[in-house]
Image (cartoon, rainbow, N blue to C red):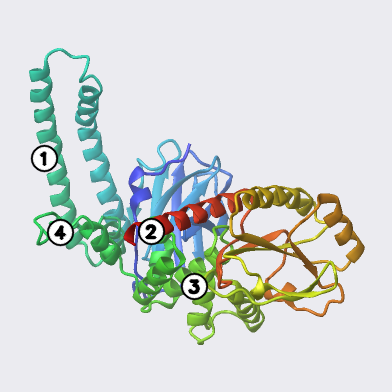
């Protein structure tokens, strides 16, 4: 069982300075009664994970020391004992002692010469005590809600619920009053920054629009703009908590619409707020860049390309070595030509009769551009399925054509596969390796499917055959609806 306070899962924030001390380095003495002759670890947070910082041997009295010549960066750390048990604490002061017991690892914690941890655990202890006090009342409220239909005395239910709500509200008000005063009294501490950052931003009263209705999007817009108001994003220590990453990820993944343009705008907004801390800026930029370069969701590579062009190419990134920087820049360059919304690079390749065919001259409203290899296992399964989808749409007179490109050089295998499955679309290849489409279209794997509009702009990519089928159906439905509306208008 892990001894971790529930409250800690909601914390978020920090700040960087280390309190001045006449001594250099760090020395943290720990005594855990009931523990002896074993190994313990000191671990520190970086983002959402704990990483080992030190490993020491425990003596027969349960005592051990973490020490070193360098000061430890401020943040939330943990002492981990055998059995995957641990307790968390703040390192800001560099010289202090901790005592507790193996049986009650968290409950018996005491600190000497560490005001930070006295503030930290004083706050947590109060909230846990209040939670214990109010929990029975919340349970009674839930019971009444569940039994509402089965209990006969409705008046009793309403009166009881009213009393319970008033009691819970009073508890909440007391907690809020305590929090405000406690954080103000201890505002110079890292602990207070952590607790403040854990609080939700208060949303003002929703304004009334000229039409007399409430502004239904006000709360969302306000929250997006002020989501990080309680965090000091110029403080390096923020990334050394289990909270910052969680809140950053929630902002990008949950609060922002999952559309490339929206994520790009939100990323610039967040990165601008971190300019006061190179470490926080680096952490956020790495997360956004790395996450969206590897994303399986269609179109998210546009976020990666934007981050590279805005921050890496312009010299704002100074911590990446030249080899890695070269790889990043090349990767962005490779992806850019085939981003959604771009005109697909033209292909002029020979078909089965030896004639050159141009992708940009395919005279259909929608063009499916597919790259495949007759020896590829996935292609062997997908291409016949694509044929079924194509035939179905052709029977329905859908304005779609397939431009099928073989990526390999064994022409006879290509022709044999085409004959076997009776492909009746445009089949082309580059068996003399004269074309650079393999690099231009970033063909690291096959099959790879793009959907183009009548101007040959990319409207979808990374599609499976089933996804393509659904996408085409939706496009045709939308086109028919537009035509009907135009006819009604005329």
Mark 4 lies on residue: 204
Mark 2 lies on residue: 487
Q: x, y (%) of residue 246?
A: 41, 56
Numbered disc in front, either 3 or 4: 4
Mark 1 lies on residue: 170
Q: Are marks 2 and 3 in contact (CB under 8 Å)?
A: no
Q: Residues within 10 Å of mark 1 (few under 14, many from 20)?
A: few
In the displayed structure, would residue 57 be above or below residue 102?
below
Mark 3 lies on residue: 70
Q: CA distance from mark 1 to mark 3?
A: 48 Å
Q: CA distance from mark 1 to mark 4?
A: 21 Å
Mark closest to the chain's N terminus, 4 or 2: 4
What residue is at 61 percent from the left and 56 percent from the top? 463
Give the left or right position of residue 294, taking residue 115 as reference: right
Numbered disc in front, either 1 or 4: 4
Query: Would residue 256 be visible to someone looking at this image?
Result: no
Q: Which image quarter is the C terminus in?
A: bottom left
Q: Furthest residue to the right?
A: 412
Numbered disc in front, either 2 or 3: 2
């Amino acid at each position: 069982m892990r001894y971790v306070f529930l409250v800690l899962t909601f914390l978020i924030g920090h700040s960087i300075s280390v309190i001045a001390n006449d001594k250099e380095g760090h020395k943290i003495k720990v005594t855990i009664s009931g523990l002896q002759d074993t190994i313990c670890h000191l671990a520190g947070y970086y983002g959402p994970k704990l990483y080992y910082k030190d490993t020491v041997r425990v003596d027969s009295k349960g005592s051990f020391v973490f020490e070193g010549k360098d000061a430890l960066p401020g943040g939330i750390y943990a002492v981990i004992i055998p059995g995957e048990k641990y307790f968390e604490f703040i390192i800001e002061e560099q010289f202090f002692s901790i005592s507790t017991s193996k049986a009650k690892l968290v409950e018996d914690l005491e600190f000497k010469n560490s005001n930070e941890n006295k503030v930290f655990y004083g706050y947590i202890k109060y909230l846990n005590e209040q939670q214990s006090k109010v929990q029975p009342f919340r349970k009674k409220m839930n019971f009444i809600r569940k039994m509402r239909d089965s209990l006969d005395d409705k008046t009793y239910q309403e009166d009881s619920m009213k009393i319970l709500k008033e009691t819970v509200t009073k508890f909440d008000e007391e907690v809020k009053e305590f929090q405000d005063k406690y954080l103000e009294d201890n505002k110079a501490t890292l602990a207070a920054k952590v607790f403040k950052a854990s609080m939700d931003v208060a949303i003002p009263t929703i304004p009334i629009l000229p039409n007399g209705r409430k502004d239904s999007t006000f709360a969302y817009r306000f929250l997006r703009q002020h989501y990080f108001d309680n965090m000091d994003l110029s403080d390096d220590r923020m990334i050394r908590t289990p909270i910052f990453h969680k809140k950053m990820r929630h902002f990008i993944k949950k609060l922002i619409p999952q559309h490339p343009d929206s994520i790009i705008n939100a990323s610039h907004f967040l990165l601008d707020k971190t300019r006061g801390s190179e470490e926080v800026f680096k952490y956020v930029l790495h997360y956004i860049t790395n996450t969206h370069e590897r994303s399986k969701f269609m179109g998210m590579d546009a976020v990666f390309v934007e981050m590279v062009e805005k921050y890496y190419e312009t010299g704002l990134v100074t911590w990446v070595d030249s080899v890695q920087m070269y790889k990043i820049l090349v990767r962005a360059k490779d992806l850019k030509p085939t981003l959604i919304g771009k005109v697909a690079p033209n292909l002029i390749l020979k078909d089965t009769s030896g004639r050159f065919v141009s992708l940009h001259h395919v005279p259909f409203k929608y063009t499916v551009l597919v790259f495949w290899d007759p020896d590829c296992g996935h292609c062997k399964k997908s291409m016949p399925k694509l044929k079924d989808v194509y035939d179905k749409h052709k029977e329905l007179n859908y304005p779609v054509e397939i431009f099928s490109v073989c990526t390999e050089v064994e022409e006879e295998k290509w022709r044999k596969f085409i004959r076997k499955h009776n492909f009746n679309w445009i089949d082309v290849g580059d068996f003399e390796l004269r074309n650079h489409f393999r690099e231009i279209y970033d063909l690291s794997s096959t099959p790879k499917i793009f959907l183009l509009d009548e101007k040959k702009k990319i409207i979808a990519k990374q599609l499976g055959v089933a996804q393509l089928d659904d996408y085409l159906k939706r496009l045709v439905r939308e086109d028919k609806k537009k035509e009907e509306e135009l006819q009604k208008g005329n």
